[in-house]
Each structure stands twice: as structure tokens, then as C-alpha cells.
Amino acid sequence: MGGLWVTRWARMAFCGWPWNHPGNPTRAAERVESCLRSGRSGTRGAERELRRLGTWRRPSLAVQPPRRPKSTNPFTRAQEEDWRRRNKTVLTYVAAAAVGMLGASYAAVPLYRLYCQTTGLGGSAVAGHASDQIENMVPVKDRIIKVTFNADVHASLQWNFRPQQTEIYVVPGETALAFYKAKNPTDKPVIGISTYNVVPFEAGQYFNKIQCFCFEEQRLNPQEEVDMPVFFYIDPEFAEDPRMVNVDLITLSYTFFEAKEGHKLPVPGYN
Amino acid sequence: MSTAMNFGSKSFQPRPPDKGSFPLDHFGECKGFKERFLKCLRDNHFENASCRNESKEYLECRMERQLMAPEPLEKLGFGDLIDGKSETKSEP
């Protein structure tokens, strides 16, 4: 709006000034009046004046007149109206689809959780670690893998924790048993909880434990020593994975931590 | 639980065991079986294939003494051992 005011004043000043000859006072007044009148004649007048001045700029959308069809031919006008209507419906559909996609992406989280609960897949995309798989497993006898064992203890836990065999030679598809030993040399019962790690980690996805002693609290009484077995197997598909061709050594490493009373450790798995 | 700081590659995801955790053998009831198994391993250069009978016996001991949920041996991968015990002894 400020722009229009400026131009109006400028128009007045401009209109009045060059023709303000002392000899023709009435003519100058006429001219100023005509200028002013043209200024008040609406946007079209302003447009004409500004075009003369060379500072014409398209007015804002608010003052734009309703859109008229570009052609004046009555036949093509109907077609244009039709196109315009069709464009509007297409635009509406596209906008609705975009909003629908956004809503679907938000809804996917609880829906996926529902799906996991009903089908029981529980976070792992592979549903094949069932016990009937073990039953029908065929050992791949020509692929011998050495499994070494490592035992670690967190600094605050005073147990003596070590494996009872340094290594074991297994083949994929064969179930194997291994032992760790833990001793509590203190005079107080201590509760420990352990986790494990498999190196190389790509082979870890083929390392399946049927039963072990990890992720659950294990309580050792004072001066008690127990054997802790690990019952595991290596998936027979290990032999068919091209990335595992050079893998001959797998290291299973267990680490024990002290479990404090009331402290719940996050257990892997889908809750 | 890998401590290496590789942010690009996937980290190791420990998985819970299929059948859960072994209860602790506080009274050493199956210790004899375990010793036999370990001795077998040491004698056979730590080859698991030679000592599957002993491991089967250890697990059977556990199942008898309520230290392990009873499971048919086929489901534990010992199907071939049940059919012919004499056959496995001749295997290399």
C-alpha cells in the first residue's frame, strides 16, 4: 500500500511540476486534476499511470480480478473450463494420496508391532530357528571350523571365570557342547549376569545357541564353583554363504557383569 | 556388544538362546559326565564329532535331575546317535 501512496504523491508532484507555468495556471490545475482523477479511477488507472512512469509491477493476488478464460472462443472456453476442473480434481486426489501416505507411515509402527505379536516372529525376520530345524539338520562334514573360547569378567565382579577347553572343532549342522567354569571366591553370595559376543561378527548370525547361561541372573554362593555349559550349533547355511568362505575360526566370548538388586538389564529380544 | 567404533557397519546383536538358560548345577550332580566329556575331547584333539555320545549323556543327566527341560534327543541334534549307538563308535 505504501507503494501506491508514494506513486500517488509522486504522480501529483510530477503532474503538477513541469507544466506549472506561471502563464497557464488553469491549464496546470486541469492537468493536475486529470492526473488525480486518473489516480482515483481504480487499479486500471493506476496501472496505466504506472506504465507511463515505467514502474509498473503486477499487483498482489488480493486485488486480482477473478481469473477469466484465456480464449474468447466459446467452444474452446468450455474445453478450458473442463480442463481446469479436471486439473483441480487431479490435484485433490494427489494431495489426498500424499496425506494418506503420511498417515500410513505413522500408523505403520503400531501395526507392525501387532503383526509381530500375532505371527510370533519377534523382531527377527528369519523364522527358521525352530527346533524342527535342528532335527532335520545335516552336518556339513567337509567344513571344519575351530571355535575358541574366551571368558571375561567385569572389573567389579570378583568371580574366577574361565573356559574349560581352549578350542573345539565343529562342523556346521552339528550340535556341540562346551563348558565354562565360574568360582565365587568371596564370602558373600554374588549374582552375575552375562552376555556374549562372537567374532567375526558376520559369522555371529550363523552361531545359534540352543541353551546357555547368558542373559539370566546366575547366583553363586560363597566359595562355590559351578560348571556352566553352552549348547550350540552352527547353522548349515554357513557353508553356503560366499562371505564365509575364508572363515575358519570363530571366537565365542562371554563377559560376566555383576547384577545389582533391583537393576533390570535390557535383555535382547522383542518385548 | 562390540566396542569397536564403526558407526557405518552394523553392530553385533546378541540373541537369546533358543531354549533359555541352563539352571546352575549347584551340587555338581552331573560333574562326572562333564569330566568324561572333557577327557574325551582332550584325547581326540578337541574334535566334537568324536565326543557326541558323551555330550548326549551329559545332557541326559541334566534332564534326569531337573537341571534341563526334558526334550526328545532328536530335537537336540542327536537323532543319529539314538538309532545305532555302535555305529558312532566306528566313525572317525
Image (cartoon, coloured by chain):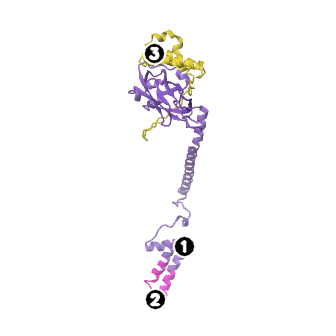
- Kind of residue at badge 1: Gly
Dot 2: within a 10 Å radius of its alpha carbon, few (fewer than 14), some, or many (20 or more) residues? Answer: few
Question: Looking at the picture, how far across and down is residue A163, in whole percent?
Answer: 46, 26
Residue where numbered disc 1 is placed: A42
Q: Judging from the image, what secondary structure is the residue with disc 3 in? A: helix
Q: Quadrant of the C terminus of chain A?
A: top right
- Kind of residue at badge 3: Ser
Query: Magenta residues, as a range?
Result: A9-34
| Chain letter for mark 1 | A
Residue where numbered disc 2 is placed: A24
| Chain letter for mark 3 | B
Cα–Cα span, label 1 and label 2: 29 Å
| Chain in purple in the render | A
- Kind of residue at badge 2: Asn
**Residue found at the far left of this picture:** A246
| Residue shown at 50% from the left, 15% from the top | B53
Magenta stretch contains residue A226: no
Q: Nearer the viewer, mark 3 or mark 1?
A: 3
Residue where numbered disc 3 is placed: B50
Question: Looking at the picture, how far across and down is residue B57, in whole percent?
Answer: 53, 16
Q: Nearer the viewer, mark 2 or mark 3?
A: 3
| Residue shown at 59% from the left, 31% from the top | A120
Q: Quadrant of residue B72?
A: top right
The hue of chain B in the figure is yellow
**Marks 1,2: beta carbons within 8 A:** no
Q: Judging from the image, what secondary structure is the residue with disc 1 in? A: loop
Secondary structure of the magenta portion, mostly?
A: helix
Cα–Cα span, label 2 and label 3: 127 Å
Q: Judging from the image, what secondary structure is the residue with disc 2 in? A: loop
- In this view, A84 is above or below A15: above
**Residue found at the far front of this picture:** A187
